[in-house]
């Protein structure tokens, strides 16, 4: 690289980009860990983007109509932190830059959503950012159609590296984006030909432009260090009716001894090499020092966005008060005030009619009343719409020909769906939910963990939640998945027993602002077990007494979902023999654990034997069977301890020993 | 479709293919569930493949040099079962066909590896088969180079549908296959333009031929119902030096009223429509009846493969006895006899030198001695070779220019790597292991579950197994993953405490023939805690007494991995205060649970208080803290109950309260 020539050709641009490179070197050296090379390679693209295109307002990082900037290659976090510090985001001070990767810093090793206002999403696990961005862009399209261009009209810019593009989820994302013609989505590919193990070609020779073009993308190829070419490409991309991929040929760790090598990917902390790189850049100030004129030129970049923000405010003020309030409600992620009444009415009606119904169908019935009053829901399924019961009658299908449609056919792309839902929720103004078979949470897990880590209130509609799925067999039957999902912090796993509990679960999901919910729903029909109407959302307590012992209480039977019916039948068998048994429905262990001890003790008093029944493994139940006031000598579990099998569902429940008779026997064995 | 013309043009072919279609209709109708349309659409391709190309021997389904046939679109299982019954595989009788999807049948809803000899892999979760096939083809390439074409020289054929190609894992697989120029891999794409939710274009408009070509594949496009075109395409594909994708334009549910519709994907059981379809086919016999001449023509297809098998036997017999025995050993998946002695010697040497070393490094040291005596190992990493320590000095890199290299740079493709490893193990003659950061088991989970379900002994080398990873932060720090992996049936999750336990874990992994192993390894250095040499593999018991109480025993401290050091330090603190504490190392809970009760009781006697310490969540520990003879009033857990954070590792252990002082305090609080 003839860096001297680059400096000379565009001296102003050069020094602005050099500020990113110098800050990156300094912060990584101070932390003695991190990733220097990516920010040094993509500094030119970022500088041109912020200077000439990105509409942002550092004083109002949450302005609804800002352009979104997503650093999918999250290890290059110092690029983002540099940009935020330089342009004047209040949360990213110079002290934060100096404190990179330390306890309590907002400048975590990878960008963490919620640590600083202005970080749009958590990235680091590769491929997630580019897959989030499809959700951002879908939300923007729907809202642009709904609210008009005066209120919603912005771009989503993404920086993705070779790692992001090798991850399978990127294919799911780009194929969906191409089919949906998401014209406001622009991806920069940091084409530096370097991965951790070596040059990219030791593992990949994919022609990425051809690959994107195959899925309907507009593709441009440029020198990623040429500011004029970068600027022209972005301008062209903004005009094209397709999503755009700009392949930026770059040099990782530009100007450093480690340039163009795998070593350049990591922490470049050698003092002499750092000094040499800074000399090449013409950067003469001390560590963390950005000359005032350069800092000012960065801060000035915000003016375009701030003017746009002021214009937007003026337009927004012209909306009716009702519309303004509705827009703000949706962006605050608050459920409408009437949701509670609507759910109550639905519960009442359900209790009265007492249907026998699969909870996946109960979920659809609930969504019918919810979607009618929540225009911000965006539903979808990974090609199992009819099985997941996720599409309600009033929902149009999101498509290039119908931008107001708010049902997304995601295709067979569970991971891409989950990541897109994260993006929609992060974008704001959208309440996404999406479905697949519960077993295929396996495919979506990478993004589901990020829902929990970021605290975004998406809802996973996971149907066919046990061996009750039947003939499709063990590949499609979740066994360990309830335990796995319950293991994840900040995830509410609901397994409702009937239509009433399903409605209550949905109420919890829709009113949540910081916790994702997983609704685990049955394929098979279940009776209504909540036969007395209660205004209160009993499921909100996680577990509660569904039926009290009639004879002297000797046992407590706990169950969730489809096994609550089994527990109730077992209770009947026991009571007939004079053995009193309480049935505790446990739709959500996480919420039960959050109740105070006195409540938990009332529901699960010491004394009676305890049996839990669930068509999954025992692992998550031990805390209620054995812990707190439970006792291993007086507790048993009826459930699965192996994979399932292919056969009709009723046969499977019998063969695996999950019947009322099995539960009654377990109780009697303990007495 | 002018089916009459098709029948007339190739009457013999037609009736053979019709046998598949008729059996499929009959079996699905009898089960009243299943997927009729795919077998009916791909029957022509399958018939030509079996008749003219596939080298198979129904009397010897395990013949090492057979061609492999992988039904990635596993829901079309009746295609495979029909082929196996018609050609005379002994395990798939007509009774099995009649018993499709019933309890105990070998003909499960989706093909299940191990149910019948001749089923090469379990499919159903979409994309897995095509990703497995890359592993099959890599194993074949390596073995062809190693043993010579006389002994190993066969093709891997795959049938994949639109769903398989939409799943992200397919991109990881095809990009790797293209880069590796796996010329013996031939994929048929069932291009029927139908998914469950509708026509493919509601979710995808990808130009699949262009996409495959972008990754270096040879692509052919044909009419999937024209036997001559199918035959010519396969012949051409076999000659090409690249992997080949044959796009087969087909009609789902050909000849049925549901042809070319989403309904055609599922169970077509309407009696009148079935009768009409059979009439169109010219199929006049009753349900499940295949005319003798047609059955014979199918059985005759095996002759080519059987002759090839006989020739192969003759060539194999010419190998030296030593070579024959070695080949058979590798295909039986048996570790070499000397492995045990080699591991023992390594343990002895380690105990003597007592290194302070990260267990990921311990794993590399172990692999150095293992790989020297096990030529069947195939190592790799998802672009973290230097961090996972998976490449030993003697390993060449698998590449088009070095087919004997047995280290694979998988690229940033955790899911594709895991699925490829399954394929290698299923192929036979290979012992795959592969690494990534433990947090990214999230990405590989779809294939890891199948390792367990199929019982294939692959080894996952999962490093950076806790907050000990440090500054990269919560996106890279596993917290819930130990519990999640322990939740999965038939998976041994090892978290060794030092180099000795790491070697013992590897011995268990390498001698396993039916259980996958996950090795959870530290980033940070750990002291040698096994300071006395024991010949016996103590880790094989899952948990054992590492250090006995010196004072009167009042506490048992259980720990795994990096927290065994913490437990030992806590013990020292307690003993200094006169409190006797036993330390139990628990490297593998699954194996501890499999010991007899007397042993478990000796390790964990009733009486002393119990504290477990692990830098993960509590969920899996409850069984030992509270269950069996534990007691919730006398038990505590020291670990994580939230996501981690970005900071140096030592800071994190302090801030999250996982130190010797915390453990000692927990013990004292209970006493």
Image (tube, coloured by chain):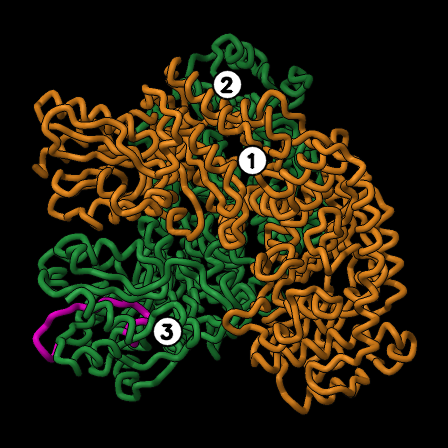
Chain colours: A green, B orange
In the structure shown, which secondary structural element does the residue marked by tag 2 occupy?
loop
Q: Earlier in the sequence, mark 2 or mark 3?
A: 2
In magenta, the rendered stretch is: A549-566
Q: Residue furthest right?
A: B9
Q: Position of residue A592 (x, y in %)?
A: 21, 59
Q: Nearer the viewer, residue B47 or A27?
A: B47
Q: Residue furthest front?
A: B321
Q: Residues within 10 Å of mark 1 (few under 14, many from 20)?
A: many
Say whether residue A230 is visible. Answer: yes
Which residue has dot 2 on it?
A268
Which residue has dot 1 on it?
B335
Up/down of B317 relative to A269, above or below? below
In three-dimensional space, the C-alpha distance between marks 3 and 1, rounded to whole angstroms, equals 59 Å
Q: Residue furthest bottom?
A: B272
Residue at image x 45%, y 63%? A644
In the structure shown, which secondary structural element does the residue marked by tag 1 occupy?
loop
Q: What mark, if any, has residue A370 been given in the picture? A: 3
Q: Residues within 10 Å of mark 3 (few under 14, many from 20)?
A: many
- Chain letter of mark 3 equals A
Do the residues indicated by labels 2 and 1 lie within the same chain of the protein? no
């Amino acid at each position: 690289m003839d860096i001297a020539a680059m400096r000379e050709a565009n001296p102003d641009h050069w020094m602005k980009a050099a500020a990113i490179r110098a800050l990156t070197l300094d912060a990584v050296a101070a932390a003695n860990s991190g990733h220097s090379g990516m920010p040094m390679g993509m500094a030119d693209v970022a500088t041109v983007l912020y200077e000439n295109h990105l509409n942002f307002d550092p004083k109002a990082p949450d302005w609804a109509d800002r352009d979104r900037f997503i650093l999918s290659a999250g290890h290059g976090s110092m690029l983002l932190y540099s940009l935020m510090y330089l342009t004047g985001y209040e949360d990213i001070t110079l002290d934060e830059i100096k404190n990179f990767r330390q306890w309590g810093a907002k400048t975590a090793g990878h960008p963490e959503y919620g640590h600083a206002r202005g970080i749009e999403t958590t990235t680091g696990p590769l491929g997630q950012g580019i897959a989030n961005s499809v959700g951002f862009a879908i939300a923007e399209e729907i809202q642009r159609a709904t609210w008009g261009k005066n209120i919603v009209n912005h771009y989503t810019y993404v920086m993705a590296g070779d790692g992001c593009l090798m991850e399978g989820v990127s294919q799911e994302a780009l194929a969906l984006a191409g089919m949906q013609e998401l014209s406001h989505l622009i991806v920069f590919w940091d084409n530096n030909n370097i991965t951790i193990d070596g040059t990219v070609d030791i593992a990949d020779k994919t022609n990425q432009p051809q690959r994107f073009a195959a899925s309907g993308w507009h593709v441009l190829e440029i020198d990623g260090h040429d500011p004029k070419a970068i600027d022209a490409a972005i301008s062209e991309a903004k005009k094209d009716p397709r999503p755009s991929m700009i392949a930026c040929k770059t040099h990782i760790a530009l100007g450093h001894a480690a340039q163009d090598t795998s070593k350049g990917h990591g922490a470049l902390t050698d003092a002499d090499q750092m000094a040499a790189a800074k000399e090449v850049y013409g950067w003469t100030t001390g560590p963390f020092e950005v000359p005032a004129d350069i800092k000012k030129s960065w801060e000035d970049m915000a003016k375009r966005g701030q003017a746009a923000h002021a214009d937007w405010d003026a337009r927004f003020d012209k909306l009716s008060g009702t519309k303004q309030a509705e827009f703000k409600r949706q962006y605050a992620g608050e459920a409408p005030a009437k949701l509670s009444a609507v759910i109550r009415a639905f519960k009442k009606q359900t209790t009265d009619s007492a249907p026998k119904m699969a909870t996946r169908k109960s979920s659809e019935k609930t969504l019918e009343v919810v979607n009618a009053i929540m225009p911000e829901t965006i539903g979808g399924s990974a090609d199992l719409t009819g099985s997941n019961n996720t599409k309600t009658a009033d929902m149009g299908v999101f498509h290039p020909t119908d931008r107001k449609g708010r049902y997304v056919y995601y295709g067979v792309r569970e991971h891409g769906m989950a990541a897109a839902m994260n993006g929609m929720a992060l974008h704001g103004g959208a309440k996404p939910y999406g479905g697949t078979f519960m077993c295929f949470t396996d495919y979506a897990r990478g993004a589901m963990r990020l829902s929990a880590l970021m605290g975004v209130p998406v809802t996973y509609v996971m149907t066919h939640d046990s061996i009750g799925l039947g003939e499709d067999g063990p590949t499609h039957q979740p066994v360990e998945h309830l335990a796995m999902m319950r293991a994840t912090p900040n995830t509410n796993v609901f397994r409702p027993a009937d239509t009433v509990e399903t409605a209550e679960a949905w109420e919890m999901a829709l009113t949540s602002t910081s916790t994702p919910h997983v609704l685990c729903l049955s394929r098979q029909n279940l009776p209504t077990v909540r036969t007395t109407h209660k205004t209160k959302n009993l499921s909100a307590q996680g577990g509660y007494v569904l039926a009290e012992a009639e004879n002297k209480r000797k046992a407590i039977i706990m169950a969730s979902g489809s096994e609550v019916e089994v527990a109730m039948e077992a209770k009947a068998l026991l009571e007939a023999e004079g053995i009193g048994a309480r049935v505790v429905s446990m739709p959500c262990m996480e919420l039960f654990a959050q109740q105070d001890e006195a409540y938990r003790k009332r529901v699960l008093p010491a004394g009676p034997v305890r049996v839990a029944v669930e068509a999954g493994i025992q692992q998550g139940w031990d805390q209620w069977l054995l812990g707190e006031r439970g006792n291993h000598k007086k507790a048993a579990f009826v459930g699965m301890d192996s994979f399932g099998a292919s056969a009709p569902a009723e046969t499977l429940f019998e063969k695996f020993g999950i019947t009322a008779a099995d539960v009654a026997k377990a109780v009697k064995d303990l007495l």
